């Protein structure tokens, strides 16, 4: 249902080590079917905020205040951890460090489809190729068999977008998703 509240971020503050918070009091309301933009200059905390919502802060980082409440369930993801895969997904800024270099790209997209959606391996791989076509990867059937090092930066980013969309997440966070795209 479009327009219903999906995620409420209230007073989110993140710190690293014993330093003062690098983000303080972030409030966001994410609604189904709508785009919410987090805008700011470089270094203002957009990626840190996104990582905190995802529960993917680096080891030294921690949420020191606030909540990230999944409105439909009432669960605070800061306390319980977000439901990665089906409920929440992210397109990271740097596809080079986000893909597994030892797995073919089709298998990286197929894996969450198999785990979270219960598709068998063949069905998951077929759906992965469809997703690769959807994000306009050239020759998706051929590209599917490649490893990340065999793709351009833009192609890797398209794989990351397909991967993030694979399980039709309720919340999709995109951290500069078009930065690495080529034409």
Image (tube, helix red, strand yellow):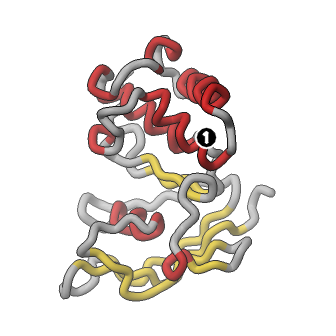
Closer to the camera, 98 or 147?
147
Residue 155 in view (yes/no) = yes
Name the spot of residue 160 as percent of width and height, x first: 44, 38
Please report the residue visible at 40 percent of the width from the left and 51 percent of the height from the top: 175
Q: Residues within 10 Å of mark 1 (few under 14, many from 20)?
A: many
Name the spot of residue 48 as percent of width and height, x first: 34, 66
Q: Could you say whether the residue bearing mark 1 is in a helix, strand or loop?
A: helix
Residue 162 in view (yes/no) = no
Q: Is 53 above or below relative to 173?
A: below
Please report the residue visible at 68 percent of the width from the left and 45 percent of the height from the top: 117
Quadrant where the N terminus is found in the figure:
bottom right
Closer to the camera, 60 or 8?
60
Quadrant where the C terminus is found in the figure:
top left
Name the spot of residue 88 as percent of width and height, x first: 56, 57
Please report the residue visible at 61 percent of the width from the left and 40 percent of the height from the top: 113
Closer to the camera, 106 or 49?
106
User: Which image quadrant is residue 15 in?
Assistant: bottom left
Name the spot of residue 110 as percent of width and height, x first: 55, 34
Q: Is 65 above or below relative to 53?
A: below
Q: Is 151 above or below relative to 51?
A: above
In the picture as drawn, the residue positioned furthest to the right comes out as 1
Please report the residue visible at 60 percent of the width from the left and 77 percent of the height from the top: 69
Tell me how many marks there are: 1
Would you name the residue on which mark 1 appears?
113
């Amino acid at each position: 249902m479009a327009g219903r509240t999906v995620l409420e971020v209230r007073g989110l503050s993140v710190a690293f080590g014993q330093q003062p918070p690098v983000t303080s009091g972030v409030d966001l309301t994410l609604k189904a079917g709508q785009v919410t933009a987090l805008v700011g200059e470089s270094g203002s905390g957009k990626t840190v905020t996104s990582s905190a919502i995802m529960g993917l802060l680096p080891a030294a980082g921690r949420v020191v205040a606030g909540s990230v409440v999944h409105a439909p369930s009432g669960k605070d993801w800061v306390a319980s951890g977000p439901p990665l895969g089906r409920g929440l997904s992210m397109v990271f800024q740097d596809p080079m460090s986000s893909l597994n270099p030892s797995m073919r790209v089709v298998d990286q997209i197929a894996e969450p489809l198999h785990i979270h959606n219960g598709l068998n391996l063949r069905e998951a791989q077929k759906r992965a190729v469809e997703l690769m076509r959807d994000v306009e990867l050239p020759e998706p059937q051929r590209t599917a068999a490649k490893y990340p090092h065999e793709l351009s930066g833009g192609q890797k980013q398209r794989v990351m977008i397909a991967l993030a969309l694979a399980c039709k997440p309720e919340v999709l966070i995109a951290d500069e998703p078009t930065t690495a795209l080529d034409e």
